[in-house]
Image: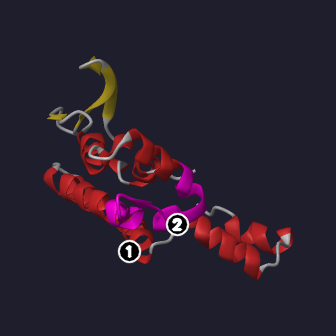
Amino acid sequence: MIDLHRFIGGYAIVRERRQIVQRRRCTGRVRNQSLDGFGNIVKPGWLNDIAWELVANHSLAEREALRREVPRAALRATLGGRRLQELALELIRNADAGLARLSGGEADRPLLAPLWGYAAAGRTPADDMLADFDAARGDPAKLIPRWELHP
């Protein structure tokens, strides 16, 4: 299942590998506190806060309907008349702006390129895999080399 947080969590928070991430309790919920390379505190959970702002005005029932629609429709799913693709592009723009503000973040901005490409096209990696499966007619001998990860 692809949801907005997982979509962003896998790619846009690319700096997390280089940062010290601490868990702490803040206002009753667990949030991330990240330190940049110079020990400066980056606003805790800023990307999660932005993601929440995109869906906060929608009811729990609407968000649940989106959660159920995403596995079938991916970025074509809608929430309150807006396609998930639009929400993803907005979130990626915010992630890009956040990286631009971080010291050393400029070096990580190119890592968002695959996200930009997928979101702009309204596609996901799963769409690519389904296309490969159809092209190979489900033949594992053809699929394995296509899906193999190369260092």
Query: What residue sits 47% from the left and 52% below the top?
Result: 66
Q: Could you tell whether 22 is left or right of 76 in the image? A: left
Q: In x, y percent, where is residue 49?
A: 25, 40
Instruction: Identify the amino acid type marked 2.
Output: Thr
Q: In x, y percent, where is residue 11?
A: 42, 54
Give the structural element (helix, strand or loop) at label 2.
loop
- As drawn, the label of residue 130 is none
Q: Is residue 108 visible?
A: no
Q: Is the magenta region chiefly helix, strand or loop? A: helix
Q: Is residue 77 visible?
A: yes
Name the quadrant containing residue 27: top left
Query: What residue sits 46% from the left and 47% below the top?
Result: 6
- As drawn, the label of residue 120 is 1
Q: Distance between the Cα atoms at labels 1 and 2?
A: 10 Å
Count of marks placed on residues: 2
Q: Is residue 48 magenta?
A: no
State which quarter of the image contains the C terminus.
Answer: bottom right
- As drawn, the label of residue 124 is 2
Q: Give the magenta range.
A: 68-88
Query: What residue sits 31% from the left and 28% below the top?
Result: 31
